[in-house]
Amino acid sequence: MTIDPDSYEPAYIQLAGLLRAAIDSGELAPGQPVPSEKTLIQQHGVARETVRRAISILRAEGRVQTLAGRGSYVRGSADEAEVVTLAPGSRISSRMPSPAERRQYGVAEGVPLFVVELEGQEAQAYPADRVILEVPSLT
């Protein structure tokens, strides 16, 4: 697929969609670098800001992480996630982490935390991109 300059959809959204599809199909695997800005500019005939906005969308979705001076990399999939089994009566919410929590839990920008509360216990937070919360069956 290519960027359609006549589309009602902005080029950066189209490019984000192309990259998302490559990630979802496994063409860009977890840990693999996303093509460089220069490569994406040349391949798709778009401006540098278009590439940056597309990568920003994927970063906000938690699909890629950008390392300063090193580029952007595909984040791991849910298949690699830790499974946390919840106790009966647990309450689950989600929220965006503070900058200190992002460092503490090692989460990228745009990745929320799951917060699990159980009466009488301290709330536990889990990075939503690396944890699957499992509810035990009652049978």
Image (spheres, rainbow, N blue to C red):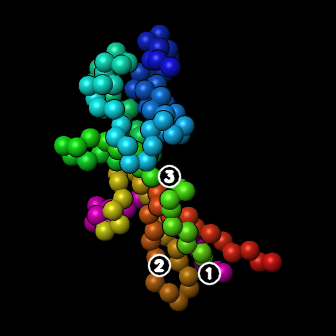
Q: In the current view of this chain or complex, which residue is farthest to the right? A: 139
Residue 2 in the image: state x and y as whole percent: 46, 17
Q: Depth check: 97 or 14 in front? A: 14
Q: Nearer the viewer, mark 3 or mark 2?
A: 3
Q: Nearer the viewer, mark 2 or mark 1?
A: 1
| Precedes in sequence: disc 3 or disc 1 | 3
Q: Residue 123 shows which numbered tag?
A: 2
Secondary structure beneath dot 1 equals loop
Residue 133 in the image: state x and y as whole percent: 58, 67
Q: Quadrant of residue 43?
A: top left
The stretch of residues the image draws in magenta is 87-103
| Precedes in sequence: disc 2 or disc 1 | 1
The reply to whether residue 93 is visible in this rendering is no
Q: Residue 87 shows which numbered tag?
A: 1
Position above or below: 135 against 9:
below
Residue 98 in the image: state x and y as whole percent: 32, 62
Tell me which amino acid carries mark 2.
Ala
| 110 part of magenta stretch | no
Q: Which residue is denoted by mark 3 in the rendering?
A: 77
- Asked if disc 3 and disc 2 are in contact, CB closer than 8 Å, the reply is no
Residue displayed at 26% across by 41% down = 71
Position above or below: 101 against 1:
below
Residue displayed at 31% across by 68% down = 104
Secondary structure beneath dot 2 equals loop
Position above or below: 97 against 57:
below
Q: Quadrant of the C terminus?
A: bottom right
Secondary structure beneath dot 3 equals loop
The span from disc 3 to disc 2 (Cα, nearest Å) is: 25 Å
Residue displayed at 43% across by 26% down = 15
Horizontal side of 119 relative to 67 (left or right) equals: right
